[in-house]
Amino acid sequence: MPDSPPQQPPSPGSPEDLPDGSGLLLCGARLTDGRTVDVRLGGGRIEAVGTAGSLTAAGSRVDLSGHLLLPAPAEPHAHGDSALSADSEGPVSYDAEDVQRRATESALLQLGHGATALRSHVRIGDMEGLDSMEAALKARRSLMGLADLRTVAMPRLLTGLAGANGLAMLRDAVKMGASVVGGCPDLDPDPTGYVEAVLEVAAEHGCPVDLHTDGTDPARLGRLAAAAGGLRSGVTLGPLGGLARVPGEAARRVADALAAAGVTVVCLPQGGCAGVDGRGVAPVRLLRAAGVRVAAGSGALRDVANPVGRGDPLEAAYLLASQYGMRAEDAYAAVSSGARAALGLPEVRLEAGFPAELLAVRGERLAGALSLAYSRIVVHRGRVVARTSAVREYCDSAAAVALDLPRQGRAAKYGGGNPA
């Protein structure tokens, strides 16, 4: 991201490279409880929340009039190594430079949507070896200060003679800096052995586990839950789309077992992802009723698994609300507090002392923001790191004037145009 010219100070709210400790005042933001407030940030945290006009700050000010201020979403299930490759001619390149570019570009795209933290699954072994992991770790370092990118080492095989190399690479990937161990047991000839190997490596290194599985085999899921219950660092499963096709009583037993083991489920309302063949979405109502912590991710982002994937957490929340009957508040929690918990990140509330990981969306109510979240301002570690501004304009309309329809408050640029 280029720096501003020396003679021009950074404009309020622009994503300049300011230290965490620089003060920032968010003015006139609307909260989900209906209050309009000022929010002062400093040191990467929320310093104070007060009624509009009541706070001052030595640093920059950002006018959030007309915006709803929310805890920032997180992306718990990305595939940065294959993202943005759907239009490639021929086989997708996994050269280190191409992987680093895709991982970086896709993370920035999702940051623009509001995701200040991401967990990206990276394939290791086979043709890629550890090159893709090394490239993803370089992307992570280049994004420091903009977004928190964490990587999951994802070997194909872990059992038998064929899996010995994958197991060695899994351990090497953790030593290189992979944050999480994972993979897809459904692709191994011995899925139970695969899970046992992953859990063993996780226990050795104190790493969390994040496994891909479609979830069509309730007995296997039950065994996985039983084995995962003793891992203190935490276990995440997803997308579990096949569990929605399991008969009711068997599915309920699996949900109870997952809840008892403390397993988090990441569903993918926007579609599937590489590594699992099944489509569909995990039975979120059943899981939540059993006490399972459910988060929502984006999955594939314009790769061969989903060439139209958007990587937008708010779209995932919108789909949970519109297609799966969740309240807007619960749907947004699945991509914000639930997703952050799945990543092991601290909770964010619009209160003093909490991390300044925030998303401002034009609108007044959460349901409306999930429907039409075009304009967004993203705050990471107490500073604005991304801004998206959208303006819709119409020609003159006597009806619009007579009805006093709402406007964005920007003067028309074109002759007679009325900005919406």
Image: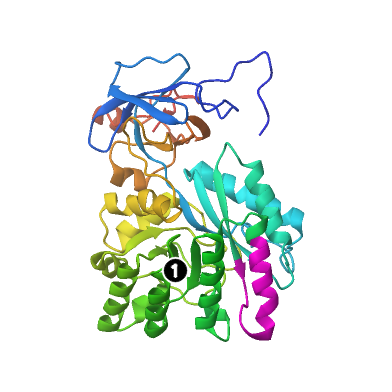
Q: Is residue 198 left or right of residue 55?
A: right
Residue 187 is situated, as x and y percent measured from the top left of the image, at 57, 80
Q: Which residues are magenta?
A: 154-173
Q: Considering depth in this image, is 355 or 242 the residue closer to the camera?
A: 355
In the rendered image, the vertical position of residue 405 relative to residue 317, given as above or below: above
Magenta span: chief secondary structure: helix
Side (left or right) of 413 relative to 102: left
Q: Amino acid at mark 1?
A: Pro
Q: Where does the image place residue 226, in percent across and percent down from the top left?
A: 38, 76
Identify the residue shown where x is 42% and y is 50%: 340
Looking at the image, which residue is at 40% across and 78% down?
221
| Residue in front for this viewpoint, 203 or 375 | 203
Q: Residue at x 52, y 51 (%)?
A: 118
**The image quarter in which residue 364 lies:** top left
Label 1 crowding class (10 Å Cα cut-off): few <14, some 14-19, many 20+?
many
Image quarter in which the C terminus is found:
top left
Residue annotated with mark 1:
239
